[in-house]
Amino acid sequence: MQGHVIVNTNNGQEGLDMIKSDRNFDCVLMDIAMPILNGFESAAKIREFERGEGASHVPERKSFHLNGRVPIFAVSASLLESQHARLFSCGMDGWILKPIDFKRLGEVLQGITNTSVRTANLYYPGVSWERGGWLIDASVEKPDEETTAAAAQELSSTLPG
């Protein structure tokens, strides 16, 4: 991605560990089907960390100050529109479907620091789920720890494997 530094991890636990060791990420693209911790579980644990021990370190990133947390985007070939509330409950801020349209991804990611772009790419029922976008506006209250953990547990029990 132009203008971004990409850091890869091999599973959800490594993704969580990366966020714990370096809070200066503008966003996370979280694959849903990963080993050790799946994307839902990893996102929920990142949110738990941000509210707990990570709360004492506030990154100097514009994206953090606008969002109050690192935005996490679910990445999957099989996310259904009916799962949007569950994605939100697990702590996801948005989604993009595979195969990834990188031009579209770039547009969605501009919403990390540009609220008008985010608003233009907000989720509305029945409107182009396949394009991906933002689940929430920057001003919306985020789900609490209990809601996030319960949603991650419910979703992980429905995943194959």
Image: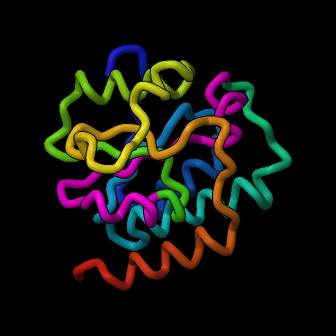
Q: Residue at x 33, y 23 (%)?
A: 106
**Residue at the top extreme?**
3
Residue toward you, 54 or 10: 54
Q: Is residue 140 magenta?
A: no
Q: Position of residue 69 (x, y in %)?
A: 66, 42
Q: Is residue 77 magenta?
A: yes
* Left or right, residue 65 beside residue 88: right
Residue toward you, 58 or 97: 97
Which scheme is used to colour this image of the protein? rainbow
* Left or right, residue 85 beside residue 101: right
Q: How many marks?
A: 0
Which quadrant is the C terminus positioned in?
Answer: bottom left
Q: Position of residue 90 (x, y in %)?
A: 52, 64
**Residue at the right extreme?**
56
Residue toward you, 35 or 97: 97
**Residue at the left extreme?**
99
Q: Residue at x 69, y 68 (%)?
A: 145
Q: Position of residue 126 (x, y in %)?
A: 27, 48
Indicate whether 66 appears above or below 89. Answer: above
Q: Residue at x 59, y 65 (%)?
A: 45
Query: Where is residue 73, by image quadrant?
Result: top left
Q: Residue at x 79, y 37 (%)?
A: 58
Which quadrant is the N terminus positioned in?
Answer: top left
Image: magenta residue range? 62-87
